[in-house]
Image: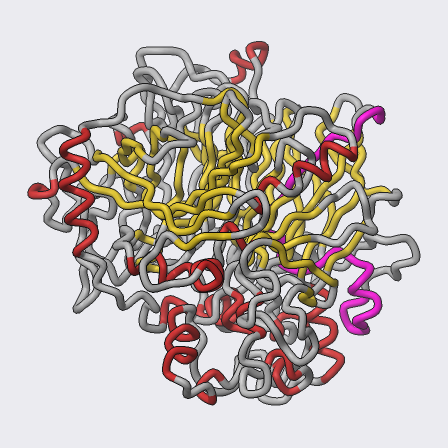
Amino acid sequence: MKLLPILTTHDGSSARSNLTCKYKCGDACFHDAPNTSKGEYFGDIVKTAMSRRGVLRGGAMAVVAVGAGGLLAACGTEDDAAATDGTSSNGSTPSTPPVDGVDFTAVAPNTEDAVVIPEGYEQGVVIRWGDPVLEGAPEFDFDNQTAAAQAMQFGYNNDFAGLLPIEGTPNAYLLVVSHEYTTEPNLFKGYDEENPTREQFDIALAAHGLSILQVNGENGSGALTPAFSQYNRRLTATSEFLVTGPAAGSDFLKTGADPTGTKVLGTLNNCSGGLTPWGTVLSGEENFNQYFGNAESVTEPAAAERLARYGLEGAASDRKWEQFDPRFDLAQEPNEANRFGYIVEIDPWDPNSTPVKHSAMGRFKHEAATIYVTDDGTVVAYSGDDERFDYMYKFVSSRKMMPGNGQAAMRENMTILDAGTLYVAVLTGDSPDAIDGTGTLPPSGKFSGKGEWIPLLRTNNDGNAESLVDGMSAEEVAVFTRQAGDKVGATKMDRPEDFEPNPVTGKVYVALTNNKNRGVDDYASVDEANPRVQNKNGQVLELEDDHAGTEFVWNLLIVAGDPEAADTYFGGFDKTQVSPISCPDNLAFDSKGNLWISTDGNALDSNDGLFAVVLDGERRGETRQFLTVPAGAETCGPIIQDERVIVAVQHPGESDDASADNPASHWPDGGDSQPRPSMVAVWKV
């Protein structure tokens, strides 16, 4: 067993490069946080009300949970238990055998230009940026890219990944992958940021969106091979989407090109997502603000305030897309930005279907949407708003899920997310007086508390909607959901990213990535759910939620960082026996109920990676690193199955001194090749 070196020397900041920040999120962390609301009065009311009601008791109240891990099983099996010698991740001997599914040799932190996996496992690239998705697509040629070719090829910077079995075809699946953003200096040699070309603009449009393709497995191996099929499809930033829910037809969504306010060209910055039990795919539009220029030209006070709350500001955008299409110029089309920031639903089984944007679920920087179905068929969708000091949301359907997987059931179920109630979370701590910003545990030995879901918007089955926020119309809540959360005093969180319900226990987990401004200057101070000043490593929140109800109890499962640091916590587990973890981002589960975490921006001087965490028993909180991705890359889209683990390797080699003319990585093809974001499968030998 390899010993894990505990990293103790680092600068304490995220490893994400300035180049990544610029093109991935529009330098969100280098700007003032858009949330300037006070939001205190309602929090006080909620604390009083909750103290009267007491603690929510009881466990899971549902029987079906589907998300990024909804179809997933364990990486290890009972037959594999002898694969390790029983030692822990730092070489000491625990009192019990390794937990099933987490019984692999932990990978040591490293900075290699490779995907590093445990001993006894193999890996293979499934598909790379530029590989054909549609029949007739040309082979990838980095130096001779065209928009027409890219629209038929696998897009750039893969993030969410979902794997759907094809019924009646053994060992065949649909792989659905989102393409979050483009990094133009790494796409094009000689790229001039001040003077991009029309062809570069068109290529970038085509590199966004989603890819849907068939992949076939191999007997006796976890490898997956792409195949052309009737299902293969590319959605891009120019594909047509239909708006549904309270915002459909709103004056806030009408533009010169679409006076109906119902048809949107494209989807942008698609980050994580989720799978539905009715066979569709959900995708969250996240940092859409960065694609629009000339926000400063909008001077009408209310409109300018709304743009600023979503991070739309300044003159020219970094990509300069407004030079080529007026819809990206807010001076010409001030409503176009209001048409992004939704949960998108795609029917992957019908390549001719029109995807929808569900406005009943609210508009913000959706990291994902993951589904939990209660025992009476009520559908609950959880989503985080990935911004410093923004909020956690859930949507509870009023319609019940129709059983079956036929087209009729799917069409009916695709309307479920158009009717129901949208909520935002308010959290209170059990030991607020013990939180001093250092990360020191309260006397109880854990960070814990209660919470309430505050209703914002109710959409009826007939499509009529009712605002539940004083001073805002239903359309305003649907389109300007952040302001609605401000008004009701929602709890400001440290970048709430992926939500995932555990398919075994029903508990819900939230990745809170980091927040360097927590407790700094005039920003919000620490609280029990966000207990550290200048939080650079993030934490993972565990909820016991009354899924269709309005109350929950919570605790922090992990307070991430260097295990030797006093401000870290691993569910009460011995910190000398865990892998260092920093900046949790995406979450998934195996069939045994173990949590898997991928990271983004590791602040511990090591590459990002994928980690497995034990949730129950005396080893609760034990954290082992399963793999690391190449230098400069981010780990995305984990899928955990019996047969394989799949990850999306995003932005390999992305560093401040790198470009297409001077690549910092040659993964995955080696030699002097350009780095290519790719999907990778890992399986046990």
Query: Would you identify the image quadrant in which residue 442 lies?
Result: top left
Residue at image coords 25%, 54%: 489
The magenta segment is 141-169
Residue at image coords 28%, 54%: 488
205 relative to 535, above or below? below
**Residue 492 percent across, percent down from the top left:** 28, 54
**Residue 513 percent across, percent down from the top left:** 37, 50
Residue at image coords 45%, 44%: 421
577 relative to 462, above or below? above
600 relative to 277, above or below? below
662 relative to 47, above or below? below
Query: Would you identify the image quadrant in which residue 187 lies?
Result: bottom right
Instruction: Answer left or right for 534 relative to 612.
Output: left
**Residue 60 percent across, percent down from the top left:** 40, 21
Instruction: Answer left or right for 54 relative to 7.
Output: left
- Quadrant of the image containing the N terminus: top left
